[in-house]
Image: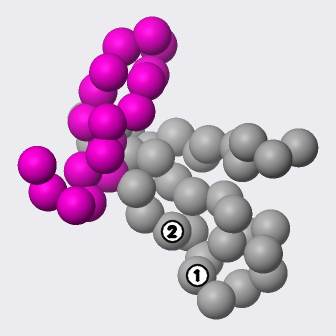
Amino acid sequence: MEPEVVYFYTDGSCTPARISWADPGTAEGAADRFLLTVTGYCAPVPRRGR
């Protein structure tokens, strides 16, 4: 298992997804946001803080 690939629950299923930071080094709001790529499909994932 590569460090880039992390298992996340999507649609109630465990699917390997790659996590990439949208804008690193910017405001914390942007830093908290990250793009979740699953099977070549990019989906914005809201931060679970608010």
Q: Position of residue 3 (x, y in %)?
A: 22, 61
Most extreme residue toward the left, as rendered? 1
- The crowding category of the residue bearing disc 2, from other C-alpha atoms within 10 Å (few below 14, some 14 to 19, many at least 20), is few
Q: Is residue 16 magenta?
A: yes
Magenta stretch: dominant SS?
A: strand
- The answer to whether 34 appears left or right of 39 in the picture is right
Span highlighted in magenta in the image: 1-18
Q: In the rendered structure, which amino acid carries the disc numbered 1?
A: Pro
Q: Which mark is residue 21?
A: 2
Residue at coordinates 46% horizontally, 13% vertically from top-left?
11
Residue position marked by numbered label 1 in the rendering:
24
Q: Determine the residue positioned at 67% across, 72% down.
A: 31
Q: Considering depth in this image, is 39 or 3 the residue closer to the camera?
A: 3
For label 2, the SS is: strand
Labelled disc at residue 11: none
32 up-or-down from 24: above or below: above
Q: Residue furthest right?
A: 50
Task: Name the spot of residue 34 as percent of width and height, x first.
Answer: 57, 58
* Left or right position of 29 against 47: right
